Amino acid sequence: MQGKSIDELRSLLDEKKVASDELFEEATKLAKANQVPYNAFVTILDKKEEVDNKTILSGIPYALKDNISTKDILTTGSSNILKDYIPVYNATVYEKLKQAGAVLVGKNTLDELAMGGTGTTGHTGIVRNPWNADYLIGGSSAGSAAAVALGIVPFAIGSDTGDSVRKPAAFGGIVGFKPTYGRISRYGLFSFASSLDHVGIMARNVKDIAYVTDIVKGQDIKDMTSLPDDFKLYQETLTSSIQGKKLFYIKSLCDIENYQNPSPILKEVLTQFKQQLDGFKKLGFVIEGVDFDEDLLSALYPTYMTISCAEATSNNANLSGIGFGSRKAGKGVNDIMFQTRTEGFSELIKRRFILGSYILKRENQERLFLNALRIRRLIVDKMNELFETYDGLIMPASGGIAKKVGTVSEQVTDSEQALENHMVIGNFGGYPSITIPSGFVDDMPIGINLTGRVKADAEVLNMAYHLEESMTYKNQFVGGKHV
Amino acid sequence: MVTKEKLKEYAANLMFDMKEEEYDTLTKEFEIIEKQMDKIGTMSNLKNVEPMTFPFINYQATLRDDDEDIDGTCINKKDVLSNAKDVLYEQVKVPKVVE
């Protein structure tokens, strides 16, 4: 059953050629067999949940990123400070999948508290790329991407604050979708940066993404930022015509002549991208390159760092060891908190919190925090202006392939690599945004990213479906170790 | 420019400490962020832009109603206390200290 789509598994289940118990057993065996070297899971469940509801997802195995709250199931955020934390409530996204009869296989490894983009900072070690274990898969939803790329589960739930679903999806050769901000309830998702956080979905084809989104979307009384449901079934509009749909790409980032001494990999990524645009035009898309203010492009990374660190500092103040989590011994309340946080957070997380705290100091707010929020508005205003003419932004998900193990750090960089950071635009504006596999460079997968107007989730999935159908990478996965 | 002593003060306010070499890494990160944000600050007319705190206005947003009468919106006391390491008289217990 490894690597089968939701449609294929649904048919097999309905025809009684396989039972849900067998699917669960095979998925957990595969998960265990592939823990070395990939480390996709923090927890692999021993017992199958039993909710006998008939939906497209009933009996289908899946995995959840380990920053999504699951009652009575260990939920660590891949951090030592929560290494023994067992929540007493369910995240809404988990509850909806449970009620739909989907079967949880396990909880996926992430960058600690989702605050990273490499898949190297989780408390249980690094996540490796199924396509080549010498490479990383990116993060923060690293384990979720690896589990889907290995074919262990047909879909997994992740979270996306900068590009944490879409980037690892690209590096894992799978599909990653972040819907409009608020489309899926964030209740029970560990907050990183609340104004940027989204629940996202990973799968091996766009139709499976639509099936899952149809189940988990909708307004939630427990999340005041959740959107009223649009009452659309995205799975039903995938095949609608895209004739005349207008897409744009950012010229300065996609034209190779704008780079001094480009690497062979960047050249190949951009060459393939341009060739694919020609193919997409033949489908009926109108695609044009547009200019985008260079100052705004170079501001993407520092703006993201400033906003996300500031919000993270505040959001994680509750990790003190007093009410929950791993409490260290101390002489009093203050000492307990001090010891707990000193031992519980990694260096990276502490550096992010100090940056955030500094940014929020009264004397720095205007120059740092408020200016970052102003830049955010300028970027979103420009995007909204372009969306008056165009239906979507199409870009390479990255200017390269996954990084080799041991070659990256999570330190703040002075590089202004807008091509590596452009997907954060989707978080600044809350736009629906999807990455689909688009080929290989040096035998490692690459992806194309498509971002649409706020609330145009159905349209984005519809366009992505047609792009996917015109290429040959749908449903690809790596066998890994078999059982 | 922010000093290492200042960074230690920030860490103490955030209730944790770091190793000396970790403060060195952080000092370099501060230099980078400061440089990048100073560059951003030179953009024209930035002062006239309203800061954007959320992606878009959701006019249909409703305040969360943490009402115990509405089933499922509140976590009950027993569950909450089950997560704490020490509990006494239905409250989280911490060491008693007179300073």
Image (spheres, grey):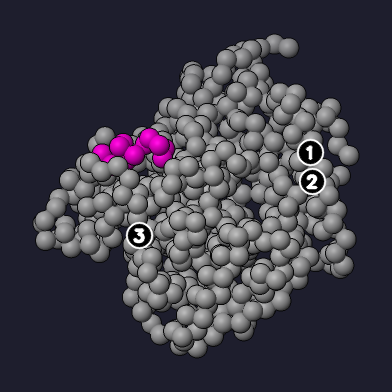
Question: What residue appears at the point 30 percent right and 42 percent down from the top-left corner?
Answer: A481
- The local crowd at label 2, few if under 14, some if 14 to 19, many if 20 or more residues have their Cα within 10 Å, is some
In front of the other: A314 or A390:
A390
Are the residues flagged by discs 2 and 1 in contact, CB closer than 8 Å? Answer: yes
Residue type marked 3: Gln
At mark 1, the secondary structure is: helix
Percent of width and height locating residue B9: 80, 28
Which image quarter: residue A482? top left
Percent of width and height locating residue A293: 76, 71
How many discs mark residues in the rendered view? Answer: 3
Q: Is residue A355 left or right of residue A159?
A: right
Q: Is residue A311 left or right of residue A57?
A: right
Question: What residue appears at the point 22 percent right and 62 percent down from the top-left corner?
Answer: A8
Q: Is residue B2 visible?
A: yes
- The local crowd at label 3, few if under 14, some if 14 to 19, many if 20 or more residues have their Cα within 10 Å, is some
Q: Is residue A377 visible?
A: no
User: Mark 1, chain letter?
Assistant: B
- Disc 2 versus disc 1: distance between alpha carbons? 7 Å
Reply above or below: B41 against B12: below
Disc 2 marks which residue?
Answer: B32
> Would you say the magenta stretch is mainly helix, strand or loop?
helix
In front of the other: A290 or A272:
A272
Disc 3 marks which residue?
Answer: A476
Are the residues flagged by discs 3 and 2 in contact, CB closer than 8 Å? Answer: no
Circles 3 and 2 on the same subunit: no
User: Mark 2, chain letter?
Assistant: B
Residue type marked 1: Lys
